[in-house]
């Protein structure tokens, strides 16, 4: 009988006695901001994959990889040793398809955190504002008031009305359920329109997070993607403007 | 493994031998009437928080508080001693997101009521009529015919066709499931348009409830909010009328 | 902890050794045909209530009765002794709100049938054709081919393409799941528009069922309701026609 | 108490020691391609029915057969001995109605595969392209990279971007969950518009599959259905064209 949620560690992951581990969660969400940041860090730091999570709460399908191999939707765990501390990354294809599944999967993530001794969790996400943003702020939330000062010093904005509707999905629940378990958790949200995958917002979050955990990550490639995306958006906007002008001159 | 529904009493809540306790349930609903009344009473009486309820049936998100701290959606229990009787308040952010969850959460509320010896439950809600109401009536329902006379004497209207569609959510199920457990329960519903948060309707319910439980609660602040809300609505209506008049004079 | 589905027999129902019992299921559905027939029979025969079924799969609300008493949505069991056989009626306010719940509740109905020794089940329903029907046929389905001849002799039409989409809900599942348990089951569906509560269709089903179980039930009151409903519909149709004629004469 | 998923083998299925069995899954899906192929093979090869699967995750209804007998929606198992190997067919009326049910039912299919010693699974489906296709390709996916070469040699196209959204339902999950259990699985998808039941696409899949498993199946009847369907579609298209031409000449 299949487990509702199954966590598998790779065989290569033998030494589970991690040093001062923190967890960074970047699952899919608004503007894919959190996913972009976490996957970029995994890529740039060369973090090592140590585990996979499958669940009946993920979409009932398979995903095709380049070699024609189909695989289940999954969340993945990556590990990186930065000096005297381990960083555990949680990334993935999807979040839960059901409300209850969000709670149950987040609880499983916290089981992992507890098992591996994680004392602090950073969750990354986007904060949709409904319009294009030139210099995206990074908004924050914490699950213990004492955490706020340190985060604000790193340039994160705290604003009760942003996001007004709360933080939905694992990025939020890791704070809420983590707090009950006594694990400190911080959510960093990059301001984003919400309309597009947003590497510029991701770059803002990366910059703040990198400072907070004192792990330098070269943002060049992410900035390149942001610049490219900006050219695309700019092109679209100019195209629209030209069309509008033409219509006006036609009327005139 | 997370519980589907978890009830936590605060450590400060040591003496659980309550005296003649009644429960007052004011969860979110139509016009937020029940929530307004119960939260106002907690505020004015200075009731003490004694517990929290979390559940996978509540929305999968966190709520941001003023200090930037994110917390799980929850229901809360407050306690107040009024002379020789205890009053237990049940309030909260949300009701269940699923049909089955409504039953299961209400069953948990009744577990609390049973554990603490509650013999009577008042549930508070709104009764949406689809138009503005100047002098909101309070409609009632009971879970045992013998309860009706006492409630009617306090000025509550009983009318089979109101509400025609029954009473949805915990305000109703506490009567239905409570009856099976042998706990008397009464629902008080303030007439309301259903379009706005309605402190005027809440004031009507408060007045009736206060009389029924013989606990005076100064309604001044609630009346102030009602007056303020009336000014806002009045302003909107006049704005609309002016616009209509202008349009007519333009046509004329 | 609440049961997902709970069956309660009344204390008055002591002698559970029924004689040759059959079950008649008339739950809500298309045109309320099945419900109308079963409730009419209970009323006319003076069947005695013997039990109630509650479930978290029914809508999460309470229903208000005339005396202001709120009660849970429920299904009910009634018993009638017709000569040397018992007739068990299954009626109710609602069917399940979820797909899985339909299966689980039907399974509970079959537990009751098995416990009480029921050897044959009649399920009653409507068959929506999308237009007004003057002389509603009664369509049939069985869960064992040998049952068909007897049913056809009573005037029931068997037609594979009617209903084309199968029989949805308990009226169908009692046949399917009943067959697996070795309980014969027959579904009788009155042709109906599907737009209105249809006592005329119910009268057709009653006539056939009454013959099949050899229990005469005076159809007079049901026919009265059907006649009344026909007058209402006729009135609506004439109103529409008059309006159309007026519009034409206005144009002309 | 009903099982969430129940597997019943027929009594005629006594000798369960199969020889080198493979499983072929053809459940309902896009263009009904997989279902058409598997049911056609069962018909042409004269495979023997050996089992049925019922589940609360299938739609809550019954299906009417020609003799007026109503039966539960189900999936079916058929067995055929082709020389020195057994072929197990999995076909059915529906797939799961819920996301979680897709996982749980696929897990049950794999329990069957494991119990009967199946070492390889072929799942059949359609690949919707949104326009009519004259010579439908067969697209493939595997759950182990080493399987690809053999499948490509049989004329199957591998293309990461097709299908871009992954493979939804049992056809995909049998690969994903099968892989975790160490069972090789291959998905063959016939290109199809997605608008109609598509025997032409099914014929393409049959041709490839027949070659892959070295079991010749006369495609004549399937080709006849394809030709007939093409005439119908052609007729519709010409009707449309004529109407368009008429409208143009009217305007002209």
Image (spheres, coloured by chain):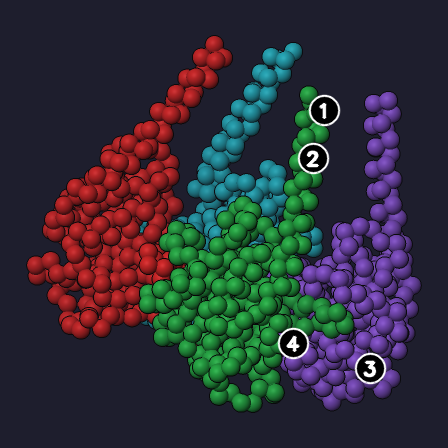
Chain colours: A red, B cyan, C purple, D green
Q: Residue at x 87, y 34 (%)?
A: C242
Q: Which residue is mark 1?
A: D250
Q: With respect to residue D177, does D127 lie above or below?
A: above
User: What is the spatial separation of the Cα atoms under label 4 and label 1, in whole angstroms?
Assistant: 60 Å
Numbered disc 2: secondary structure: helix
Note whether A245 is above or below B180 in the view shown.
above
Callout 1: 10 Å neighbours few (<14), some, many (20+)? Answer: few
Q: Position of residue B141 (x, y in %)?
A: 62, 58
Q: Nearer the viewer, residue B23 or C98?
A: C98
Q: Is residue A51 above or below residue D31?
A: below
Secondary structure of the residue carrying numbered label 3 = strand
| Relative image position of residue C49 (x, y in whole percent) | 74, 75
Residue identified by numbered label 4: C177
Q: Chain of mark 4?
A: C
Q: Residue at x 39, y 20 (%)?
A: A242
Cα distance between the residues tagged 2 and 3: 68 Å
Q: Are marks 2 and 4 in contact (CB under 8 Å)?
A: no
Q: What residue is disc 2 on? A: D242
The residue positioned farthest toward the top in the image shown: A252
Mark 4 vs 1: CB contact within 8 A: no
Q: Please tell me how crowded label 3 is: few (under 14), some (14-19), or many (20+) other residues with Cα within 10 Å.
A: some
């Amino acid at each position: 009988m299949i487990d509702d949620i199954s966590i598998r560690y790779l065989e290569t992951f033998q030494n589970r006695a991690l040093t001062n581990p923190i967890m960074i969660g970047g699952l899919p969400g608004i503007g894919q901001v959190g996913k972009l940041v976490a996957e970029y860090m995994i890529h740039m730091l060369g973090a090592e994959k140590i585990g996979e999570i499958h669940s009946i709460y993920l979409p009932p399908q398979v995903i095709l990889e380049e070699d024609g191999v189909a695989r289940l939707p999954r969340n993945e765990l990556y590990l990186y040793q930065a000096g005297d501390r381990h960083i555990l990354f949680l990334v993935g294809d999807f979040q839960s398809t059901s409300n209850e599944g969000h709670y149950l999967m987040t609880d499983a993530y916290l089981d992992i955190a507890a098992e591996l001794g994680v004392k602090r969790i950073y969750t990354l996400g986007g904060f949709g504002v409904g319009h294009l943003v030139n210099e995206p702020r990074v908004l924050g939330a914490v699950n213990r008031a004492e955490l706020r000062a340190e985060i604000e010093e790193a340039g994160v904005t705290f604003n009760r009305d942003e996001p007004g509707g709360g933080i939905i999905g694992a990025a939020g629940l890791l704070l809420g359920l983590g707090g009950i378990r006594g694990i400190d958790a911080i959510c960093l949200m990059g301001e984003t329109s919400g309309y597009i995958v947003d590497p510029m917002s991701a770059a803002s979050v990366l910059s703040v997070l990198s400072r907070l955990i004192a792990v330098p990550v070269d943002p060049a490639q992410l900035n390149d993607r942001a610049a490219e995306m900006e050219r695309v958006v700019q092109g679209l906007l100019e195209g629209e403007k030209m069309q509008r002008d033409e219509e006006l001159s036609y009327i005139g």
